[in-house]
Amino acid sequence: MRLETPIPDLSALNHRPAGRHGKIQAVGDELFFADGTPARFWGANLQAYALFTTEPRFMRAHAQRLSRLGFNLVRIHHHDSHWVQPNIFGSEAQTTRKLDAFSLKKLDQWIAALEAEGLYIWLDLHVGRSFTPEDGIEDFEEIAKGETSIRVKGFSYISPSIEALMLEFQDKYLRHINKITGLSYAEDPAVIAVMITNENDLTHHFGNALLPDKNVPRHNAVYMEAAREFAVEKGLDPELTWRSWLHGPSKLFLNELERRFNDRMIENIEATGFEGLITTTSLWGGMSVAGLPSLTRGSMVDGHSYGSSGEVFYDPRTQPGFLDWLAIGQVVGMPFSVSEWNIGEFPSDDRFIAPLNVAVRAAHQGWDAPIVYGYAQQPLNGPLRPTNWSMAEDPAMMAMMPAAALLYRRGHVRLAEKTYALCPDHEAFFGSSITPASSVGIRTIVEQSRLVTCMPDTPALPWLHASVLEGQPYEILDTERSYLEPDAQTVAADTGDFYRAFNDGLIVIDTAKTQAAAGHLSDKTVATTNVAFEVENPTAAVVVQSLDDEEITTSGRILVSLAGRAVPEELSFRIEPLVGRLQIKAPPELTLRFPDQRKAALGAHSFQDGVHVIDLEKLGTGNWFYLE
């Protein structure tokens, strides 16, 4: 699916230029612009080599393409990672304390091109920066262990010299004036969010790096003394407080360390003039709810999750899917973003299900900004090597992106009718591992109703605001109860907008403006209110949507999106054409056309007995068609 491939045009959904409604603000768990316009973002990561080696003309072309595909947010990621050359520090820089003028020029060009097409910007401040001896970090050699550079995840929370360098970077970065827009990154209203440090937490992943057995004696001494002081002050067992791998007092202490660091970083960010959304780091990689408190120091909580092939078959009574891990991140009264999601393995035969699944769940749960990882991390000057991290040309994933964007951004799937609140007391919250893996209640409710997580009243953490459930009726979640009957074979939204038949490996969406079937469709007819899906392929996704905000039955413009299996072959894909037919109840005068306005082949479309009949086999390998 090359840059020149005809695609649908959803760019009318975007605010052009981005930022014209003023700066973003959080109001409870929702986002609004300064003029009161509601904000909802469907985003993509743009990372690594794509940032610094793409030519300006291709930047503009891909900005237009992203807008047409339905995206309105881009996260700038892996700008500082050493494996990317050049990066924000230049090529093989001896120090990471100087921002490279040429690299900043490339980012300026990208940001200006994206904003012109109505795409808002998310900036990460620290991702994979490898510090060098010339940077002047105290006790550098202790972390390096003979290496010539270091990554500082975990250590950043206890090392004043590392923190000082991170503060220095984010101050320079956000104060940099874009030579094209004339605005600093901090004051640009189109820059709506920043992340302090990517996938860098003590509560689950990197607290162990500071332990006595890790041969970092000077850093361990700082850590152990901080743990001792915290334990004495709060009346906790000192021997349990430093043991980062255990739930209990250590999770209180580790949240406190993260909180201290986050507060200092946030103060510096705000001093640059930035007034947008701040995320600290993310809920990711199997974290329990005990990792959430320090994340609430920002203005939005963020999560990352990657799925697997075949999740459409997962029985929620026994196994969590990748979106279940995100659901526990929706903290009461705060917005929630997902700055990374994808299918982790490549190529997964059914990866095209993921965009629809994410859009449906995000709309139903009320999430604010799902961002796929990633659109591209390779240079965008020509054909891409197929990977899930550079999916710009993947016909399986990209085929479903406009449908997912339209569904989510236009609210075709409604917010859940009922909300369940996960509200353990502080002893259970910090003292046990509460996750989708450990709780059948979480797994079985999140496809039916909304889930929010409460912050507990925690005497040891006076800065943690206990959640107050107000404004709508809530039911307290029983983590040990299955909310599915023992013989259930489907799980359905309480709105009736979608269901997943996990025994059959099938997701069905049935709303007035979007109707879809995705998964294992062969040997059955899947019927929604206005569409009959008869697909012979073992696995596929088909979506029928109104483009003019009318219901499908009265719409004068309908988008049909198709995706089947696509296998990478060098710099392209071998695509399996769909076989079967669709029957769509819609106005009789509509004609079937490609996105470039070519009419479909003779015999591909007919109108019989009040129904449009589409022969999929006669459409070839195209991914999109209009009835208009």
Image: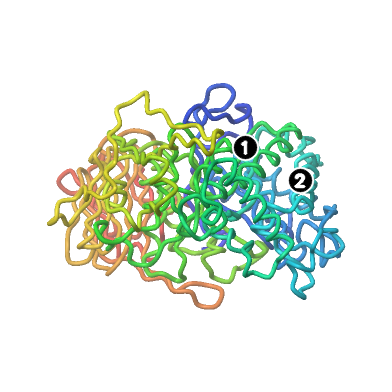
On the picture, is 526 further left or further right than 361?
left
Could you classify mark 1 by the number of other residues whose Cα lies within 10 Å: few (under 14), some (14-19), or many (20 or more)? many
Secondary structure found at label 2: helix
Label 2 Cα neighbours within 10 Å, binned few <14 / some 14-19 / many ≥20: many
Look at the numbered disc 1 and give the secondary structure of its residue. strand
Residue 267, located in which quarter of the rendered image? top right
Looking at the picture, tell me which residue is in the foreground, 298 or 81. 298
The answer to whether residue 69 is visible is no
Q: Quadrant of residue 188?
A: top right
- Quarter of the image that includes the C terminus: top left
Residue 559 x %, y %: 37, 47
Seen at 79% across and 62% down, the residue is 139
Q: Residue at x 50, y 37 (%)?
A: 13
Q: Amino acid at mark 1?
A: Ile
- How many angstroms separate mark 2 from mark 1 (CA)? 20 Å
Q: Nearer the viewer, residue 357 or 563?
A: 357
Nearer to us of marks 2 and 1 is: 2
Up the image or down, 199 lies above or below 302; here it is: below
Observer-nearest residue: 335 or 24? 335
Task: Please tell me which residue is depicted at 33% across the width and 66% down the height of the picture.
Answer: 310
Kindly identify the amino acid type of the residue bearing the numbered disc 2.
Leu
Towards the viewer: 334 or 497: 334
- Residue bearing mark 1: 192
Position of residue 39 in the picture relative to residue 542 (left or right): right
Residue 617: image location, x then y, percent: 30, 66
Pointer 2 or 1: first along the chain? 2
Q: Position of residue 367 (x, y in %)?
A: 44, 40
**Residue at 20 percent of width and 54 percent of height:** 490
Query: Can you identify the residue that label 2 sits on?
Result: 167
